[in-house]
Amino acid sequence: MFEIHCPYCDEKRPEIEFAYAGEAHYVRPNAKEQAVMSDEDWSRYMFIRNNIRGEHAERWWHNAGCNMFFNAIRDTVSDKFVMTYKMGKPRRTPAQIDKARTAQNDGAES
Amino acid sequence: MKYSAVSLFANALSGHKKWPVQFPDKELKKSYDAIIVGGGGHGLGAAYYLAKRYGITNVAVLEKGWIGGGNTGRNTTIIRSNYLFDESAAMYDHAVDLWDGLGQELNYNLMFSKRGVLMLAHNIHDVQSFQRHVHANRLNGVDNKWLTPQECKAFCPPLDISQDRRYPVMGGALQMRAGTARHDSVAWGYARAASKLGVDIIQNCKVTGIRRGADGAVEGVETEKGYIASSKVGVSAAGNTSVVMEMAGLQFPLESYPLQALVSEPIKPVMPCVVMSNAVHAYISQSDKGELVIGAGTDQYTSYSQRGALHLQEHNLMSICEIFPIFKRQRMLRSWGGIVDVTPDRSPIVGKTPVQGLYVNCGWGTGGFKATPGAANTFAYTIAHDEPHKINAPYNLDRFVGGRLIDEAAAAAVAH
């Protein structure tokens, strides 16, 4: 079972309090975009996922806690969380992820 | 050497020290007529059928680990074909047809046992939907029949059918042609039979790249052991399909999840069949060694780690104890996880890809083992003819653009 750091509670809590909510940073197209989207575009939005083997940006929902959604970077090979961050913040850059990983390896809180 | 009672006796006289290697390690050739990426049951089966039925014997199977070490050796060995939709019934029943007599064909003891799979109904909705399955199956020529709770109990005596339980048994659908097989035997049996027909089985050989020509067609694959040329590459890499497809610049509608299973300490024969319950959500059978083999759903998050969380196992066991209070004091021996590639409609993708010469057999999710011979045969047909077999034609990649999904996710209400 994971211990997951909720960025809203600012606390590490057990996985059973959370629900996984799929890959992060998938933005639903707005009405203007939808009007010109092809079947291929819809397929990409609906069905295609990156399914990363490595550091994966994903959403989690603290449904048995503060009930907030947030984003996380987790390594899907080691299952180790590199960092979590609040909803609405942009996709983490490789440099930010590297920094968080280094800090974690040094024993600091992510 | 042909395995038989005579060869067993002869080898006993020499202390079982002179059995020949089942599938010898081969040196990689520079080129092949076809390459299969992934040495699980599906990939080895495809190589076998390519050589046996479709006349392509210059084939290599590339496996990054060892034969039988992936999902083929990590599942709960259940075989059945009682699926709702016509496309599914055709595919899975084709597999069940091939399971029959496969041990003889491969000259390998697969321990295929048609002990029956009983799917329990616990509420009115279950009863209605399973009876619909029974009728749909009958129209498709797939055996499946409805049992009352008393008939379920008579067929599977350890079952608790008392009606005061939280989830009482209200009946069940029984498929008698369904059952179990020894899973890693399936990989070894196909490997040995394919190897005899001239297929090279290369273990510890990870594919690191897919090389494409100026016209975009496949030219060969880069591996840890060097470059191999081939104009036909079939990918049968289960949970790692997305990673391999990325090498050809393709993105697939797949997500990889851990699926766990566990076994109890061995006990005397008590479970005569396989029992599945979608509403309580667990499935159980007993191996010939005596272990109770237990499984349920995937973990909630995507992962490639081949392990899952302990609280999921606890949940599985609570479900088993609900249906079989008799097993409450049974101790668990070991558990493991495999990585399954799940599609949005929970049906597989078997066929051609947008890249000429690149074929894929993936997306079997939590239910790939039962389909092994059927998937392998139709996949081999597709590779040999550059056209899908009529059974796997509906399982194309285009359905995720056109919208003609084979929605077993909705039909089964759980991963399956």
Image (spheres, helix red, strand yellow):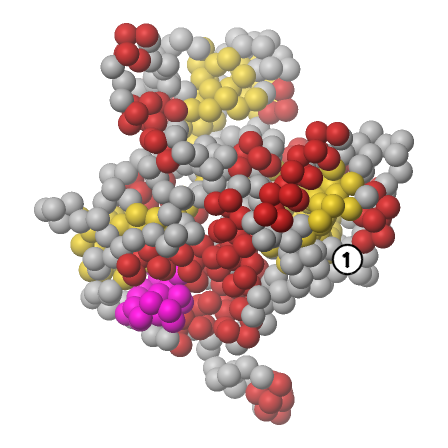
Residue B72 vertical position relative to residue B202 in the rendered view, above or below: above
- Residue underneath mark 1: B272
Say whether residue B378 is left or right of residue B300.
left
Across and down, in percent, residue B88 comes to 51, 46
Residue B241 image point, x, y percent: 38, 44
Q: Is residue B53 magenta?
A: yes
Q: Is residue B155 left or right of residue A40?
A: right
At 47% from the left and 57% from the top, the residue drawn is B374
SS under mark 1: loop
The single residue placed furthest to the left in the displayed view is B214
Image side of residue B375 versus residue B35, left or right: right
Which of the 4 image quarters holds residue B343?
A: top left
Q: Which residues are magenta?
A: B46-66
What's the residue type where badge 1 is placed? Pro
Q: Residue at x 44, y 43 (%)?
A: B348
Q: Is residue B38 visible?
A: no
Q: Chain of mark 1?
A: B
Rendered position, B136 above or below A110: below
Q: Taking B266 as reference, is A57 left or right? A: left
